[in-house]
Image: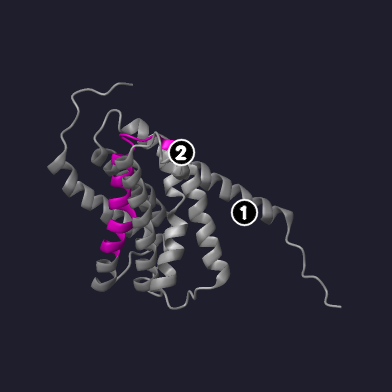
Amino acid sequence: MPSAGPPRPASRLLDWRVRFGALALIWGFSFLLIKVGTEGFAPFQVTFGRLLFGTAVLAVALVVKRDRLPRGARVWGHLTVAAFLLNALPFSLFAYAELTIPSTLAGICNATTPLWGMLLSLVALSEDRPTRVRAAGLGIGFVGVLTVLGAWQGFSGLDVTGTALALLASFSYAVGWVYVRRTLAGTGASNLSLAGSQVGLATLQLAVVTPLFTSMPESVEL
Protein backbone atom coordinates (compact mmCIF):
# COMPACT_ATOMS: atom_id res chain seq x y z
CA MET A 1 0.00 0.00 0.00
CA PRO A 2 1.68 3.26 -1.11
CA SER A 3 2.42 5.70 1.65
CA ALA A 4 0.92 9.15 1.51
CA GLY A 5 3.22 12.04 0.76
CA PRO A 6 4.44 14.24 3.58
CA PRO A 7 1.80 16.76 4.68
CA ARG A 8 2.47 20.33 3.73
CA PRO A 9 3.24 22.61 6.67
CA ALA A 10 0.30 24.66 7.90
CA SER A 11 2.42 27.80 7.69
CA ARG A 12 2.97 27.25 3.97
CA LEU A 13 -0.76 26.77 3.36
CA LEU A 14 -1.51 29.90 5.36
CA ASP A 15 1.12 31.85 3.45
CA TRP A 16 -0.49 30.83 0.13
CA ARG A 17 -3.94 31.84 1.33
CA VAL A 18 -2.75 35.17 2.68
CA ARG A 19 -1.01 36.02 -0.58
CA PHE A 20 -4.01 34.98 -2.64
CA GLY A 21 -6.36 37.03 -0.46
CA ALA A 22 -4.09 40.07 -0.58
CA LEU A 23 -3.83 39.83 -4.36
CA ALA A 24 -7.61 39.57 -4.69
CA LEU A 25 -8.11 42.64 -2.50
CA ILE A 26 -5.51 44.70 -4.35
CA TRP A 27 -6.80 43.72 -7.78
CA GLY A 28 -10.44 44.14 -6.76
CA PHE A 29 -9.94 47.56 -5.20
CA SER A 30 -8.31 48.79 -8.41
CA PHE A 31 -11.72 48.88 -10.11
CA LEU A 32 -13.18 50.95 -7.28
CA LEU A 33 -10.24 53.35 -7.41
CA ILE A 34 -10.58 53.65 -11.20
CA LYS A 35 -14.20 54.69 -10.66
CA VAL A 36 -13.15 57.27 -8.10
CA GLY A 37 -10.37 58.53 -10.35
CA THR A 38 -12.60 59.06 -13.38
CA GLU A 39 -14.79 61.41 -11.33
CA GLY A 40 -12.02 64.00 -11.38
CA PHE A 41 -9.69 63.01 -14.21
CA ALA A 42 -9.97 61.83 -17.80
CA PRO A 43 -9.67 58.06 -18.38
CA PHE A 44 -6.26 58.40 -20.03
CA GLN A 45 -5.03 60.45 -17.07
CA VAL A 46 -6.22 57.79 -14.63
CA THR A 47 -4.44 55.12 -16.66
CA PHE A 48 -1.24 57.15 -16.85
CA GLY A 49 -1.30 57.70 -13.10
CA ARG A 50 -1.73 53.99 -12.41
CA LEU A 51 1.14 53.09 -14.71
CA LEU A 52 3.44 55.81 -13.40
CA PHE A 53 2.90 54.69 -9.81
CA GLY A 54 3.41 51.05 -10.79
CA THR A 55 6.63 51.89 -12.61
CA ALA A 56 7.95 53.73 -9.56
CA VAL A 57 7.23 50.78 -7.26
CA LEU A 58 8.82 48.26 -9.63
CA ALA A 59 11.84 50.52 -10.17
CA VAL A 60 12.45 50.60 -6.42
CA ALA A 61 12.13 46.80 -6.28
CA LEU A 62 14.64 46.44 -9.12
CA VAL A 63 17.13 48.69 -7.33
CA VAL A 64 16.70 46.90 -4.00
CA LYS A 65 17.19 43.48 -5.59
CA ARG A 66 19.94 44.79 -7.87
CA ASP A 67 18.23 43.20 -10.82
CA ARG A 68 19.15 44.01 -14.40
CA LEU A 69 16.89 45.09 -17.22
CA PRO A 70 16.40 42.68 -20.14
CA ARG A 71 18.88 42.85 -23.00
CA GLY A 72 18.38 42.67 -26.75
CA ALA A 73 16.34 44.73 -29.20
CA ARG A 74 14.12 41.74 -29.98
CA VAL A 75 13.16 41.32 -26.33
CA TRP A 76 12.38 45.01 -25.96
CA GLY A 77 10.28 44.91 -29.11
CA HIS A 78 8.18 42.08 -27.70
CA LEU A 79 7.96 43.91 -24.37
CA THR A 80 6.59 46.98 -26.16
CA VAL A 81 3.79 44.91 -27.68
CA ALA A 82 3.14 43.20 -24.34
CA ALA A 83 3.00 46.58 -22.60
CA PHE A 84 0.29 47.70 -25.01
CA LEU A 85 -1.78 44.50 -24.78
CA LEU A 86 -1.43 43.92 -21.04
CA ASN A 87 -1.28 47.45 -19.65
CA ALA A 88 -1.85 50.47 -21.86
CA LEU A 89 -4.88 49.18 -23.79
CA PRO A 90 -6.83 47.27 -21.10
CA PHE A 91 -6.18 49.88 -18.40
CA SER A 92 -7.51 52.59 -20.72
CA LEU A 93 -10.52 50.53 -21.79
CA PHE A 94 -11.49 49.83 -18.19
CA ALA A 95 -11.18 53.52 -17.33
CA TYR A 96 -13.46 54.49 -20.22
CA ALA A 97 -15.86 51.64 -19.40
CA GLU A 98 -16.28 52.84 -15.82
CA LEU A 99 -17.58 56.16 -17.04
CA THR A 100 -20.88 54.36 -17.67
CA ILE A 101 -20.80 51.09 -15.70
CA PRO A 102 -20.25 50.39 -11.98
CA SER A 103 -16.93 49.11 -10.72
CA THR A 104 -18.54 45.83 -9.67
CA LEU A 105 -19.59 45.11 -13.25
CA ALA A 106 -16.10 45.98 -14.47
CA GLY A 107 -14.70 43.45 -12.01
CA ILE A 108 -17.13 40.79 -13.23
CA CYS A 109 -16.10 41.44 -16.83
CA ASN A 110 -12.47 41.15 -15.78
CA ALA A 111 -13.27 37.67 -14.46
CA THR A 112 -13.70 36.53 -18.07
CA THR A 113 -9.96 36.92 -18.69
CA PRO A 114 -9.10 33.30 -17.75
CA LEU A 115 -11.89 32.10 -20.04
CA TRP A 116 -10.60 34.12 -22.99
CA GLY A 117 -7.09 32.96 -22.12
CA MET A 118 -8.08 29.30 -22.13
CA LEU A 119 -9.91 29.71 -25.43
CA LEU A 120 -6.97 31.45 -27.10
CA SER A 121 -4.37 29.09 -25.67
CA LEU A 122 -6.21 26.09 -27.10
CA VAL A 123 -5.99 27.73 -30.52
CA ALA A 124 -2.57 29.41 -30.41
CA LEU A 125 -0.44 27.24 -28.12
CA SER A 126 0.42 23.78 -29.34
CA GLU A 127 1.26 22.54 -25.83
CA ASP A 128 -2.28 23.27 -24.61
CA ARG A 129 -4.25 20.42 -26.12
CA PRO A 130 -8.05 20.66 -26.07
CA THR A 131 -9.70 18.06 -23.84
CA ARG A 132 -13.26 17.34 -22.84
CA VAL A 133 -12.63 18.65 -19.35
CA ARG A 134 -11.19 21.93 -20.66
CA ALA A 135 -14.02 22.34 -23.15
CA ALA A 136 -16.59 21.67 -20.43
CA GLY A 137 -14.90 24.10 -18.06
CA LEU A 138 -14.78 26.77 -20.75
CA GLY A 139 -18.44 26.33 -21.57
CA ILE A 140 -19.55 26.37 -17.93
CA GLY A 141 -17.45 29.46 -17.29
CA PHE A 142 -19.00 31.45 -20.12
CA VAL A 143 -22.51 30.35 -19.13
CA GLY A 144 -21.79 31.55 -15.60
CA VAL A 145 -20.60 34.95 -16.81
CA LEU A 146 -23.62 35.33 -19.10
CA THR A 147 -25.87 34.48 -16.16
CA VAL A 148 -24.26 37.11 -13.95
CA LEU A 149 -24.56 39.70 -16.73
CA GLY A 150 -28.26 38.90 -17.09
CA ALA A 151 -28.18 37.44 -20.59
CA TRP A 152 -31.39 35.52 -19.99
CA GLN A 153 -33.18 38.80 -19.19
CA GLY A 154 -31.85 40.51 -22.30
CA PHE A 155 -28.99 42.28 -20.45
CA SER A 156 -31.58 44.69 -19.03
CA GLY A 157 -30.10 47.67 -17.22
CA LEU A 158 -26.61 47.25 -18.65
CA ASP A 159 -24.80 49.93 -20.59
CA VAL A 160 -23.85 48.04 -23.73
CA THR A 161 -20.92 50.26 -24.71
CA GLY A 162 -19.32 50.28 -21.27
CA THR A 163 -19.77 46.55 -20.83
CA ALA A 164 -18.32 45.87 -24.29
CA LEU A 165 -15.26 48.01 -23.48
CA ALA A 166 -14.70 46.10 -20.23
CA LEU A 167 -15.02 42.75 -22.01
CA LEU A 168 -12.63 43.95 -24.71
CA ALA A 169 -10.14 44.91 -22.00
CA SER A 170 -10.38 41.41 -20.54
CA PHE A 171 -9.87 39.92 -23.99
CA SER A 172 -6.79 42.11 -24.44
CA TYR A 173 -5.31 40.65 -21.25
CA ALA A 174 -5.78 37.16 -22.67
CA VAL A 175 -4.21 38.07 -26.02
CA GLY A 176 -1.27 39.62 -24.21
CA TRP A 177 -0.83 36.58 -21.98
CA VAL A 178 -0.67 34.24 -24.99
CA TYR A 179 1.69 36.65 -26.76
CA VAL A 180 4.05 36.74 -23.78
CA ARG A 181 4.09 32.95 -23.53
CA ARG A 182 5.03 32.65 -27.18
CA THR A 183 7.63 35.41 -27.35
CA LEU A 184 9.16 36.12 -23.93
CA ALA A 185 9.37 32.68 -22.33
CA GLY A 186 12.96 31.56 -21.91
CA THR A 187 14.57 34.98 -22.33
CA GLY A 188 16.66 34.49 -19.20
CA ALA A 189 15.42 37.73 -17.63
CA SER A 190 13.75 37.60 -14.23
CA ASN A 191 10.01 38.07 -13.81
CA LEU A 192 10.63 41.30 -11.92
CA SER A 193 12.86 42.63 -14.68
CA LEU A 194 10.31 41.80 -17.39
CA ALA A 195 7.42 43.23 -15.38
CA GLY A 196 9.26 46.46 -14.58
CA SER A 197 10.30 46.96 -18.19
CA GLN A 198 6.82 46.17 -19.48
CA VAL A 199 5.04 48.59 -17.14
CA GLY A 200 7.67 51.24 -17.82
CA LEU A 201 7.09 50.96 -21.57
CA ALA A 202 3.34 51.19 -21.04
CA THR A 203 3.90 54.36 -19.03
CA LEU A 204 5.85 55.86 -21.93
CA GLN A 205 3.04 54.93 -24.32
CA LEU A 206 0.47 56.73 -22.15
CA ALA A 207 2.85 59.66 -21.66
CA VAL A 208 2.63 60.20 -25.42
CA VAL A 209 -1.11 59.61 -25.79
CA THR A 210 -2.46 61.41 -22.72
CA PRO A 211 -1.44 65.01 -23.61
CA LEU A 212 -2.86 64.57 -27.12
CA PHE A 213 -6.37 63.69 -25.96
CA THR A 214 -6.77 65.29 -22.54
CA SER A 215 -6.20 68.51 -20.65
CA MET A 216 -5.59 68.96 -16.94
CA PRO A 217 -8.78 69.55 -14.91
CA GLU A 218 -9.24 73.05 -13.54
CA SER A 219 -10.32 71.70 -10.15
CA VAL A 220 -10.68 68.34 -8.44
CA GLU A 221 -13.31 67.58 -5.80
CA LEU A 222 -11.95 65.84 -2.70
Disc 2 versus disc 1: nearer the observer:
2
- Main secondary structure type of the part rendered in magenta: helix
Q: CA distance from mark 2 to mark 1?
A: 20 Å
Q: Is there a contact, CB below 8 Å, between mark 2 and mark 1?
A: no
Three-letter amino acid code of the residue under disc 1? Trp
| In magenta segment, residue 86 | yes
Tell me what residue is drawn at x 29 percent, y 38 percent: 46
Q: Is residue 62 visible?
A: yes
> Between residues 120 and 187, which one lies in front from this camera angle?
120
Residue at x 28% of width, y 28% of height: 40
Report the number of numbered marks: 2
Q: Is residue 3 shown above or below 146?
A: below
- In the rendered structure, find residue 81 and report the number of the disc placed on it: none
Can you name the residue that lies furthest to the front here? 153
The span picked out in magenta is 79-104
- Any mark on residue 16, and which? 1
Residue position for label 2: 29
The three-letter amino acid code for the residue at tag 2 is Phe
Give x and y (percent) for residue 26.
48, 43
Neighbour class for label 1 at 10 Å: few (<14), some, many (≥20)? few
Q: Is residue 202 magenta?
A: no
